[in-house]
Amino acid sequence: MTGPLAANPNPTSFDTGALGTWYVTGAITGLALSQDHRFPGDRKALSDLSSVQVFIQKTSGPLQFFVQVGGYSMPALGTAYLPAHKTIDTFYGAVPQAFVKYAPNDHFSIMAGKLPTMIGAEYTFTFENMNIERGLLWNQESAVNRGLQATYVQGPVTTSVSWNDGFYSNRYNWLCGSLAYAIDQNDTLSFIAGGNMGQSARVSAVTPLLQNNSQILNVIYTHAAGSWTLTPYLQYTRVPANAELGIVHSASTTGAALLANYAFNSNFSLAGRAEFISSSGSATNGSPNLLYGPGSKAWSLTLTPTYQNRLFFVRGELSYVKTSDTTPGFALGQDYSNRSQLRMMLETGILI
């Protein structure tokens, strides 16, 4: 969790004897949404359960584990809202993340299972992030991978390597790596890269053909001191041409974002996000579409005031997406021709 929401500091625990201490926590949250220029099948206003999940984990000893069970939705800027009951079947199932971890010492660990991606600066579920919705850059990133991840920590340097199935393709041909350097107790600089080392023709709602055959690079800086948390980051993605997959031309996106949160006190904070992303290519030469048509661009602004009192929280959100150089049929709205979208959201719940 990046904040401003904080997990239960006194979670329920069970001493299982020889199997160690297990912790049980969870999130029960709901949201309401109002928007203009909605997509086909979407609604102008709606309400939904954004998370009804339980987390069971063991965090000590050489053998550890994490299991996440329940329902969830995954709202993101500039995309149609998919209700929680459809998200479970369409995306990662009722157990979206689960893994075992072997940590023989404080320096090395290896995990296997359904893992959270190491790509990007935003996490998968609403309560984990500064904002309710994930941003435009997140739409180019994977969220959950099935595979292996090894991590080594030495002083201020943390290195991770993962072999996984990319965009949940069930084809294990993605290699990802992360190098993070803790400059001091307040500042961290991270370099993250990943890509498909082969090719995959598998396509589903959670496995887009182009992104699943892409390469991605992130440079992420995090500053957390006093009332401020600032996370600027850069992102570059590239999809190479592949005649066998029907990708006639290569394409790329370049993006930048600033995530920020200011805590006025222990209960109230204000988070914001600003983004810009552009894509290469042209519709006239058959370039693939990675955004809102080949060569399109978009920017967004998001504000999210948050109030939390112990386990209970409530937060609102105002977001605006503006696109340019779009291709008719690939933009926003009922006929995919609108160039902007305004959303208002409210999320509330408890983190048990």
Image: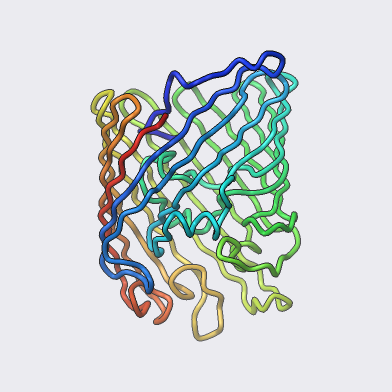
Where is 325 relative to 3, above or below? below
* x, y percent for residue 159: 66, 34
What is the residue that sits farthest to the bottom in this orientation? 284
The count of marks equals 0
Image quarter hosting the C terminus: top left
* x, y percent for residue 224: 40, 28
Tell me where residue 177 sits by quadrant: top right
- Residue at image x 66%, y 64%? 213
Where is 222 relative to 14, above or below? below
Quick one: 295 or 77, which is closer to the camera?
77
* x, y percent for residue 215: 63, 58
Where is 268 relative to 200, above or below? above
- Residue at image x 62%, y 57%? 167
Question: Along the horizontal axis of the image, is 75 left or right of 45?
Answer: right
Tell me where residue 166 sits by quadrant: bottom right
Question: Along the horizontal axis of the image, is 17 left or right of 96?
Answer: right
Q: How is the image coloured?
A: rainbow
* x, y percent for residue 336: 37, 77
Quick one: 340 or 128, which is closer to the camera?
128
- Residue at image x 46%, y 45%? 125
- Residue at image x 64%, y 19%? 60
Tell me where residue 170 sits by quadrant: bottom right
